[in-house]
Structures are given as C-alpha cells and as structure tokens.
Amino acid sequence: MLHKYFKKEEWFSNVKNDTLSGLVVALALIPEAIAFSIIAGVDPKVGLYASFCIAVVIAFVGGRPGMISAATGAMALLMVTLVKEYGLEYLLAATVLTGILQMIAGYFKLGRLMSFVPRAVVVGFVNALAILIFMAQLPELTNVSWHVYALTLAGLGIIYLFPYIPKIGVLLPSPLVTIVAITLVVIVFGIDVRSVGDMGELPDTLPIFLIPQIPFNFETLMIILPYSVSLAIVGLLESLMTATIVDDLTDTKSDKNRECSGQGMANIASGFMGGMAGCAMIGQSVINIKSGGRTRLSTLLAGLFLLIMVVFLSDLISIIPMAALVAVMIMVSIGTFDWGSIKKLKTLPISTNVVMIATVIVVVWTHNLALGVFVGVLLASLFFANKISHFMYNETLYNEVTDTREYKIVGQVFFNSAERFVEFFDFKEVVQNIIIDLTRAHFWDISAVYALDKVVIKLRREGANVTLIGQNEASSTIIDRFGIHDKPGEIEKVMGGH
Amino acid sequence: MQYIKNMQKAVFACIDGSKYSEAVCDYALHIAKELNLTLVLLNTIEHPSSSFAANLSGNISLGERDDLLHELSSEDALKNRQTINHSKEVLKKLKQRVQESGFKNITVIQRHGTLYENLKELEDKLRVVIFGISGTDHMNDSTQIGSHVENIIRDVDAPIILVNKEYTPIKNVMIAFNGESGSIRALEEVSSSPMLGRNITRYLLNSNNDKSRSNALIKQAREIVKESELRCEFIQKSGDALEDILESIDKNSIDILAIGSYSHGKLRSALFGSFTTKLMQNVKIPLIILK
C-alpha cells in the first residue's frame, strides 16, 4: 500500500531540473495565491497557506506527477458570496467538505465521467477561465492614477521581453524580475500606489491545525453544501483537464481516480490549516513543464519554497505594488487562454463552436464554471442527438397483386427522430395490407416505441391490415444497462444488419 | 517482425545496450538451445523520465501550450529515433552472433515503454527472462541494482536469470534452499526442467543453525529431486547465510546460483534490507530467481 506513494522514478529521476522548476513555480505561485485570495475576499495568507498545503499534499497523493495544484481563480470565484455573507470560518468548513466530496468521487471512480465532457466544452472552460482571471484584475485597474497603468504595462513588457535577453533571459524567471523591478521603481520614485500589504494579512508563522469555528449543525451544512458541491465539481474538472494537458505535454499517463481523491485529501488538509479550496492550475502546470519539472519532487518543492519565501520574506512581499501582481496575472490569463481554439474557429463545425462559445458566455455571466460546463455538455448532447437522428431512412415498396404497401425502416429511432419516423408513413393512401419491416431499425427509447404504437393504431383505424416484421430485433436496443450487449459479437448483432 | 500477441512461449533476452548485453545474449542462447524454444532479443525504448535543458523564464504567452507541445514532442522524437537506431545496431550484431553459432530460431523485438511494463504485458509468453544486473544508468557501479530490477523480480511471474558477468559455460548449479516457496520452485525448475541440461552437477545448500530443521529441509529437497540419475550433492551449513553461500560458491567453483526471491513485503525490505538484494549485490555469478 505504502510503496505506491514512493515510486522512486516518480520522485528522483529528474532532481536538478525539478528543483529549479519548483523554484520558478513557487515564485509564480506567490502572486497568484495573493491575487486569488483577493478575488475570494479573504486575507492573502488564506490563499498562501492553501497553496502550500495543497501543493505539498498533492505531491504525495496526486495521480499526475509534475502537475501543480494550489489556490486557483476558478475556485476563488465560487467562494465570493459565501465569504461575503458568512465569513472565513464557513469558507474553511466548506473547503473541508469539498475535500470529502472529492474523495468520495475518487472512491466511486467518477473520474471516468470526464468522458462525457466534449473537447469543445473543455476548450470553453479553459477560455472562460482565462477571461475570468483577466476580469478579476479589472478592479485594480479602474479608478486609479495613470501610474498604475504605466507600471502594469511596464511589468508586462518585462515579462515578455526579458526572456529574449541572451543567457540570463532563460535563467531568471521573468515574473520575478518584473516584481523586483516594479517594486524598486515604486520605492525609488516614491510613487503612491496600492501594495500587497494593503490587501490584508500576510502569513507570519507556519500554518497550524485549526478546526473551523462554526456551529456543527444541519443549518450550517445546508449553507456550505451548495458551495462545496460547486467547488468539488469545478476543482475536479479543472484538475482532470490539467492532468490531460500534462499527459499530452509529457507523453505519459496519469491516474485520474487517484487524482480525484488526492485533490480531496489536499483540500481537507488546506481547510484544517486555514487555507481555501484549490485545484490543479493550468498555467502553473504548463510553466512547470516548460521549466523542466517532471516528477512529484517539483510539486513538493514548489510548495515548500513558497512557504519558506512567504514566511521569511513577508515584509518584502507586503511592499510589492499591486500593479506588478496584475501584470503577472494578466500573463497567467493570456497563457491559460487556448489560442489554438480561436484560430480553428473557422474550420470547425458550427455546432462545436456554439458549444464552446455558449460555455464561455455562461461562465463569464455567472462566474460559475460548473454551470458553464453543465450548459456546454447539455448543448453538445443535444447536437449529438440531432446528428444521430439523421441516420434514419425509409424504403417503400408497393405490391399491386396483393395490394400491399411495405415500409422498410433503417436507422436510429429515438426521442429526437420519433416524429420524423411517423412522417415516413402515408396515412392517406388507401391500401389493404401494410407491412412495416423493422429488422434494420433500432429503437433506443420509449419515445420510439410510443411512435410505432401510434403509427400502427392510425393505420389500422384507416382499415388496413398491419403486419410488423423484426419488432424484437428493433427493440433489443432498448437496454439501459449494457451487459452482454457490449461484447463485439453482440454489438454486431444489434448494430449490424441483423 | 512477428505479431506479439500470437507468440509462443519463448526465452527472452533483454538487451539494453549496456556492458552485459553480449553476456545476456549468450546465456539466453544457451538456455534457448537446451529448452529448444525461440530466443527473443527484446529491446525496450524507455520514455525519458527526465527533461532537457530547461527554460526557466517562467512566463507563458498566447498559444504557448501548443508550441510547447510541439517543441517537447519533436525533442522526444529526435531522442527516441537516436535510441531506436542505436539499439537496432546492437540487436543486429547480437542476432548475427547467434545465427553464426548455428541457432536459427531467433526473433528480434523492439517495444516502447519500460522493461517492467513490457515484461508484464508479455508475461504469458515468458519461459525464462534474462537480463543484466545494471542498466545503462548505473554502468560504472557494480553494486548498484538497476532501477527496474527489483520491481521486475517482485512482480513478473517467470523464472528470471540475472547476468552480472561475461558468459562462461554452465557446468554446475547451486540452489540456495531454505524451504520457502521461492526456493522450492527454484529447486523444481533446475532439477526437473531441462533448462540447464541434464549432465551438470547440482549442489543444494541449506544454511541453518537448527540442525533438525536443516535435516528436515534436506529430506524435503531430496524428495523434490527424486530422479536418481541427476548428480546432486547436498551441503548443510550453519552460520551466516550470505557467507555460507559465498564460501560454497568459491569452494565448488559454481557457475550459476538458483534462489527464491523476496519473501517479504517491500516496506519490510526497505526498513531492514532484503536478503535477495544483498545476494544480488554480493554474488559474482549469475542468479536464477524464482518467486
């Protein structure tokens, strides 16, 4: 059991690069954790403690080595009203409950439900997240002096141009250079702009174990449960999406169910250590891979470096101007955005684009990624049903000698195609015998059966003798549970020409 | 190349291009001849688990994820192609060597993934698996056990031969017998199967401080060996098991040692050290290992 957590090659196969990338990620995590705390409406220390706890715990129990998890924007956005109305203690309790729900999801192997989320929804989720992270920076950029704009632009300039300097450009993390440079400029010229210290308390000690101070009753549960459910869903969605991105980048496999329960354990730890709920981070994970991080060691070190820097350098961190932070966050937003999806808009089918854009709009509208995914999946399913319903046609023959009309129905009959199925039949035709051949039709649900009943009754009422052929084969597809039916031979029987 | 799923049981020589590759091939050839089975030269192309020179600029720009994917995959492609071609050379030479010795029943297989993964997948095709004690990673350190060796010995269900020196003809074998299931299977394998040929001398060593227990074990071993034509000597010792084994190997100039593997869990081995690991580190002749 224990050795599962200590596979040597998952820890020590890439030590030098993992150490460096852990450091780079820790430096980038600090501004993010602070920024996301501000979004959630809590002190920066809540996000920083969360990032430390989650990164350290997930390093051991996660299912995707090399992926970075910490306090995230997607999760922070879901907590805003809870914090505003009930305060921090309820957030901590909700965080623990989120973790418990995620562990349950991991136990029941719900990671496989990800297969119901189409690619278009994933892209929509990622783009919406990028937009939300950007929008969360806007309060820092409205009703401020021109100094803030200048500093933010200068910050972005450094972030993207510094790496072009030969040699040191790829050795020093440009977000760090930005933060140091902007801070120095503000201090040297005595510019009066808001700094991180103005946004709330920073950590001055190591995190300690605390039981959230809330009344333990049913009422409390009803307050935090809806938040926890959203948090659990969004956390797992972003984590599993990020895991897939890291899988692709590194051409390795991850254990999705272990990741689900791992995220749960990390959130439980975070809640009890005074941190907010978090999940995997797309931007940071990409930065980690780009910086050479591959194993669990990089994740662990990112968390440890973060804590060391935050606890021992909190005085320095408090003087960082918010403008520098905003510049870093705009970079994160840009990096999170799936630019390829915009370039491909023209070539993809309209239904795919509608699903993607609808997901983005719903998320940006409601600030709830779970709702966006729900709408996206729903739309995608409807489009799919619509496409499949076209796989139905009708051949018809008339035998003059016996005065018999034969209808041969081929294809998929279900709720969406049932109406078209009825329209195949010519109810006005006066004919003595009618044969409906269903051997090559597939009846997927009760709507299809009901439509057939309707057709038969109507034809009989007009005075014709109606015979059905192959009714059993057609309705053998009405099965909710695939048991023997999903074996190749059986699939052939059901889907093939009978 | 033969379609892997239709293969018959065969003798697998795992070739990684390290210094023991030729010896692995020669031992495997010997055993394939004795068993009259196909000799498979298996080479695995492991995915690099470490990264290249990193870019520590720590920023991400628009569309960088896609760029990074292309960059990393072309880096991997380049490295993989080099490894594949290098291994192909090695395999070609070894195949020629085998064919020149007059043995024609040989197949070469190259597969992606770790040796462990591939052996697990091929488990039901493995009659015997032969590989070198240290992979290319630890080429200069003879006491280091290759990174996958322990996992393979623990999990892969097949007789394993661990090669740690140049090939010399096998004229005798010693079985370290302690009555545990692994050593019983080791004894059965080297006494009843023709793996090592019938005409070699077999030594059976039991090292035990408890005389009556030792006698009982020797009696049990005699029953397993049964066949009287086999030349088999029984040695009883009392003292430190490892030293007894090393001493008997020296005294009788043993060519190959058969043992049962890891009778304890991984955790206990990690805490107290494992006898199997100690043997692998100290014995200077190839080991036949059974679970």
Image: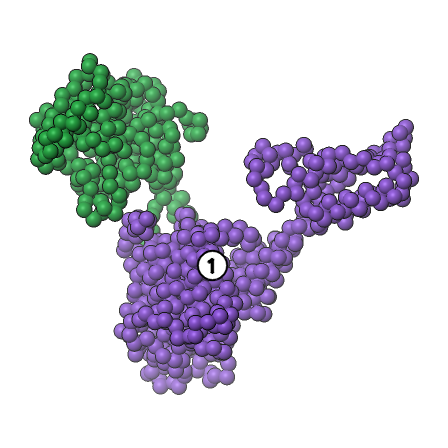
Chain colours: A purple, B green
Is residue A359 at all visible to an observer of this figure? yes
Q: Is residue B210 above or below residue B200?
A: below
The quadrant where residue B31 appears: top left
Q: Residue furthest front?
A: B212
Q: Position of residue B18 (x, y in %)?
A: 25, 36
Q: Residue at x 27, y 39 (%)?
A: B149
**Considering depth in this image, is B25 or B148 the residue closer to the camera?**
B148
Q: Residue at x 43, y 72 (%)?
A: A216
Q: Position of residue B82 (x, y in %)?
A: 35, 40
**Considering depth in this image, is A263 or A169 the residue closer to the camera?**
A263
The quadrant where residue B175 appears: top left
Which corner quadrant holds the N terminus of chain B?
A: top left
What residue is pinned by disc 1?
A236
- Determine crowd level at label 1: few under 14, some 14-19, many 20+ residues with C-alpha closer than 10 A: many
SS of the residue under disc 1: helix
Q: Residue at x 36, y 36 (%)?
A: B120
Which corner quadrant holds the C terminus of chain B?
A: top left
Write down the chain letter for disc 1: A
Is residue A132 at all visible to an observer of this figure? no
Q: Amino acid at mark 1?
A: Leu
Q: Decide if residue B83 is on the left or right side of residue B165.
A: right
Q: Position of residue B41 (x, y in %)?
A: 33, 29
Q: Residue at x 18, y 39 (%)?
A: B275
Q: Is residue A109 above or below residue A433?
A: below
Q: Position of residue A412 (x, y in %)?
A: 69, 43
The quadrant where residue B97 appears: top left
Q: Is residue A300 above or below residue B166?
A: below
